[in-house]
Amino acid sequence: MESTFLARYRPSIAEGLRCVLAGGEPLRSVLRYHVGLEDASGAPAEALGELIRPSLVLLVAEGLGGDREAALAAAVSLELVHEFSRIRDDVRDRARMRHGRPTVRNRCGEAEAINAGDSALAFALAVARTAGDTVLDRIVRAAIETIEDRALASSFEARWPNVDEYTDMIDRKTGALFRCACELGCVVSGAPREMRTAFDEVGRDLGRACRIRDDLREIWDNEPALGEPLGVDVRRWRTSYPVVAAATKAGEGERRMLKAAFAAETPSGGAVGKAVEMMERLGVREDGAREVDGHLGRALSKLERLPWGEDGTRRMKELCEFLRPAVPPGGGR
């Protein structure tokens, strides 16, 4: 169920994406499909994702009295960087489905998907430029951080990352875009440096919470909506929170079993099921829920000390409630 926070900004962001991606060129059509503005036949669709990051730009800008037009341009630019990252993730992970729809990689092939991802990044930079040099500079830095994250994730294919390394990795990708969202809202509002520093910390905590929540969901929740089998992250890569946390907590025999789930190019359903059962036995799902709650609590605590309106804090609380995992700390499956 969508939060009122996200519903408030969705129409403006959707229209902004529609304007940027309008036109008959093939790559624009591919991107309209990818972001959810069109279906596979090219007909209009309402399949946009959560749009948390661009909504956060607009929330911060609104709360600080920022320029609405510049804020929307910054928000759309940031969402296009996010879409660039998602397309490249789908290519790297050979993903077949995303949110119940075939990925661009699955539908158009890897070469066209890479072209579409590059195009999304180019559009992001072009839109950011219309909002000013500072917005453009921040978008460029966020894009670089997401690319660096891919390289860091690849380095973990030969070894097991620990929880600290996992946190550093998500701070470069998910965290980078959330920090960027908060900073962009400050930039278009002319907020002082100390305000930008405080919101950077808020964005870091929100980014960590969102990434861990998504990692939990991709293994346990929303299977029909995500369009992938249970335990897809166990099949795909070893850098999701449940896998990293399980490897850290497991004994030697359990760790060998978990590693065996990654050994084959296509692990058996039985191996994946055993890995997920082991995570549940170790309490990884509950640990993750507690981590999310902790990061959200820290973000709200910092926000409540900032000199901005009560409406902004109330809407941020709505976002935090939306980000909480379905399983509360200490709960079962």
Image (cartoon, helix red, strand yellow):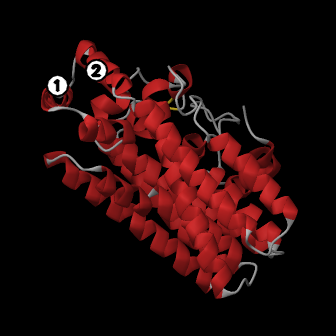
Q: Is residue 297 above or below residue 63?
A: above
Q: Amino acid at mark 2?
A: Val
Measuring from the top left, give residue 109's x and y in whole percent.
Answer: 35, 38
Residue assigned mark 2:
272
Label 1, residues with CA under 10 Å away: few <14, some 14-19, many ≥20: some
Q: Residue at x 38, y 42 (%)?
A: 241
Task: Give the residue at x 39% y 29%.
Answer: 283
Q: Is residue 231 left or right of residue 321?
A: left
**Tag 2, which secondary structure?**
helix
Q: Is residue 103 visible?
A: no
User: What kind of residue is marked 1?
Assistant: Met
**In the displayed structure image, the side of residue 279 where residue 289 appears, left or right:** right
Q: Residues within 10 Å of mark 2 (few under 14, many from 20)?
A: many
Label number found at residue 246? none
Closer to the camera in the image, 93 or 34: 93
Residue 330: x and y in percent read 52, 29
Question: Is the N terminus in the top left, top right, bottom left or bottom right quadrant?
Answer: top right
Quarter holding residue 242: top left
In the figure, residue 2 lies in which quadrant? top right
Percent coordinates x, y for residue 213 in the rendering = 52, 40
- Residue 31 position, x and y percent, is 55, 48
Mark linked to residue 257: 1
Residue 321 shows up from this direction: yes
Q: Nearer the viewer, residue 92 or 118?
A: 92
Outermost residue to the front: 330
Q: Secondary structure at mark 1?
A: helix
As measured in the structure, the alpha-carbon distance from the residue carrying label 1 to the one carrying label 2 is: 10 Å
Residue 314 versus residue 134: which sits nearer the camera?
314
Residue found at the very far top of the displayed protein: 270
